[in-house]
Amino acid sequence: MNGWQILGDAMLSLVPPALVGLLFYVVMRSIIRADRGEREEYSRIEAEERNKRDQA
């Protein structure tokens, strides 16, 4: 084996962990965004309910 083959094998061995890391990032980002949207919607509903209660 020459140096280029060793370097190529090392680079190829890093591909699966990089893909798993990318997948983890995408999944966590979508979970966090969904949670943020849900919290905003909950806050909006709470504000509407407080307005209704205060006006009654």
Image (cartoon, rainbow, N blue to C red):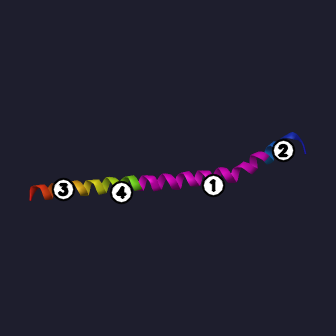
Q: Position of residue 55 (x, y in %)?
A: 9, 56
> Magenta span covers which residues?
10-34
Residue that numbered label 3 is attached to = 50
Label 2 Cα neighbours within 10 Å, binned few <14 / some 14-19 / many ≥20:
few
Q: Please tell me which of labels 2 and 1 falls first in the chain.
A: 2
What residue is shown at x 51% (from left), y 54% (from top)?
28
Residue that numbered label 1 is attached to = 20
Q: The residue under label 4 is which amino acid type?
A: Glu
Calculate the distance from the C-alpha at mark 3 to the C-alpha at mark 4: 18 Å
What residue is shown at x 58% (from left), y 54% (from top)?
23
Instruction: State which quarter of the image contains the N terminus.
Output: top right
Label 2, secondary structure: give it: helix
Q: Please tell me which of labels 4 and 2 falls first in the chain.
A: 2
Calculate the distance from the C-alpha at mark 1 to the C-alpha at mark 3: 45 Å
Q: Please tell me which of labels 3 and 2 falls first in the chain.
A: 2
Residue 51 lies left or right of residue 26; in this view the side is: left
Q: Are marks 1 and 3 in contact (CB under 8 Å)?
A: no
